Amino acid sequence: MIARLSELLLAYENNANVKLIIVKGNGRAFSAGGDLATIHGHFLNGNLRFGARVSQTLLTLTYLITTLSKPQVSFLNGIVMGGGAGISVHGKFRVATENSVFAMPETDLGFFPDVGASYFLSRLPGFFGEYLGLTGANLDGAEMLACGLATHYVPSAKLSLLEEALTCRVASSTSSICDLASTVSAIIDEYSLKKPALSEKSAYYKKGIIDKCFSKPTVEEILSALEEELTKANTRAGDHKEWLAAAIQSLKKASPMSSKITLRSIREGRVQGIGECLVREYRITCHILQGEISKDFREGCRATLWDKDKKPKWKPSKLELITDDMVEHYFSKLDGDDRDWKELKLPTISKLPVFANSKL
């Protein structure tokens, strides 16, 4: 599917008759992400390279979406997780609905948020991206709009009308590619709710405490700060006790190695362009697949997707057992002779649109 999407997008980008690309899911989800169970099956057969090739194809597709000159509109009407975020969040327009559920739950699987997540999570308000990446917390459509993951919020009942309006009015438009984005945005605005109500329990209302805790330089200090806040909350009525306890529990059950990798990846993403982020994420992925320091990804897939006992045995088992040198290994350049373990080579794109240039 990833290869087919790449093929279609390249064809549409080079077809002067194509003015707009609409991406939507076929079913209850937009996309729940990559088929990690199949990757684990290849692990069991000794084929580590399969996962590397999938990652290479997906990250290249992510870069293609980032650099498209044609506006892409993604209808995020359902689950948007992992790779599903990669093929939508980097596009120009992301339309959330009341059915949207966003998450990057990779640390529970012994992996880390890739598909350019170190780019888009690091650019969310404050340290909200660190919170999402480390806890794997879910967001609904209103929260996606509030934090910037979505550009619009349209009730699902209006999506078919919106698609029809986009198809008809863009097809008859004589606007240049540069001006077409404004036309598309105006059409979506006609069907959008500007400020859908956030749930009373929304994490977005906890931005102050999120910034205070998740701005800490290490995962250990983030966890300690959350535990300190929970101690304070237990002495007061009506505070954030339930949310704090859930965040702490999420951090404690995640792979310690994945948490360390995730925090550093997002922090590095704050000062890098999307291309640099994707190259770095491919390095990390290859080192995780090779399992030289930790085999947590295989264990996470086994416990969650294969045996489904939900009891992963992480190694190293604690944050304090992981040294800086161990984490550094995952960020080191790939210098092997094998084509599957070489640095990611992204395609050269000419005539980049302005919004894509800003990401690079």
Image (cartoon, rainbow, N blue to C red):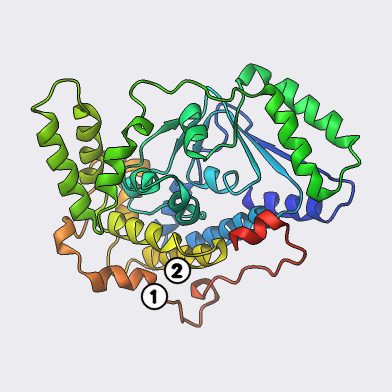
> Looking at the rendering, which quadrant does residue 238 occupy?
top left
Image x and y of residue 34, in percent? 51, 47
Image x and y of residue 97, in percent? 56, 25
Q: Which mark is residue 332?
A: 1
Return the residue found at the far front.
208
For the residue pair 8 and 137, the one nearer the viewer reads as 137
Q: Which mark is residue 351?
A: none
Left or right, 288 with reference to 152:
left
Left or right, 306 with reference to 64:
left
The image shows residue 197, relative to residue 312, as above or below, that is above
Q: Amino acid at mark 1?
A: Ser
For the residue pair 223 and 343, the one nearer the viewer reads as 223
Q: Circle 2 is placed at which residue position?
A: 283
Tag 2–tag 1 contact (CB < 8 Å): yes
Observer able to see residue 48: no
Name the residue: 19% across, 60% down. Answer: 316
